Image (spheres, rainbow, N blue to C red):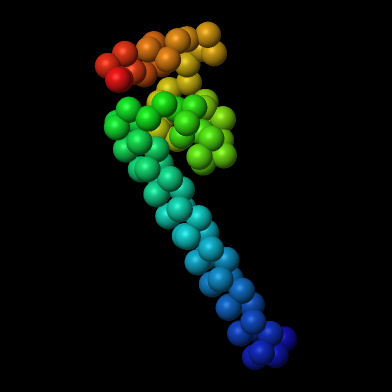
């Protein structure tokens, strides 16, 4: 294997690691934005439309435990009844 091949492999591996870090960072930013939007009273359905996810996936991003599908929004997010 030539020095050029070794260098190319090292660069490719570093690029992959950088991409994985950027993906992790983007996911963290999305989670934080979802939590803030929910705290500000934004309906999970609206958030889901904006971020192109299902409402259940939005709630999963917050780290909320899985809830049975037949819960009302007030049961899934207790503070929802305080929303305007």
**Number of numbered markers:** 0
Report x, y in % for residue 52: 57, 39
The residue most toward the front is 84
Does residue 3 appear left or right of residue 65 in this picture?
A: right
| Residue 55 in sight | yes
What residue appears at the point 37 percent right and 30 percent down from the top-left corner? 42
The residue most toward the bottom is 3
Report x, y in % for residue 3: 65, 91
Locate residue 34: give its quadrant. top left
Does residue 83 appear left or right of residue 10 in this picture?
A: left
Does residue 29 appear left or right of residue 17 in this picture?
A: left
What residue appears at the point 64 percent right and 77 percent down from the top-left corner? 9
The residue most toward the right is 1
Report x, y in % for residue 80: 34, 18
Does residue 62 appear left or right of residue 52 in this picture?
A: left
What residue appears at the point 61 percent right and 74 percent down from the top-left corner? 12
Locate residue 5: give its quadrant. bottom right
- The quarter of the image holding the N terminus is bottom right
Locate residue 4: give its quadrant. bottom right
- The quarter of the image holding the C terminus is top left
| Residue 79 in sight | no
Report x, y in % for residue 54: 56, 30
**Is 16 rendered above or below residue 68?**
below
What residue appears at the point 29 percent right and 32 percent down from the top-left corner? 40
């Amino acid at each position: 294997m030539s020095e050029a091949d070794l260098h190319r492999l090292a660069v490719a591996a570093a690029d992959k690691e950088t991409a994985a870090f950027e993906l992790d960072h983007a996911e963290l930013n999305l989670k934080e934005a979802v939590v803030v939007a929910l705290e500000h009273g934004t309906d999970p359905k609206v958030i889901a439309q904006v971020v192109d996810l299902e409402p259940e996936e939005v709630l999963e991003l917050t780290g909320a435990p899985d809830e049975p599908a037949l819960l009302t929004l007030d049961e899934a997010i207790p503070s929802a009844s305080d929303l305007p």
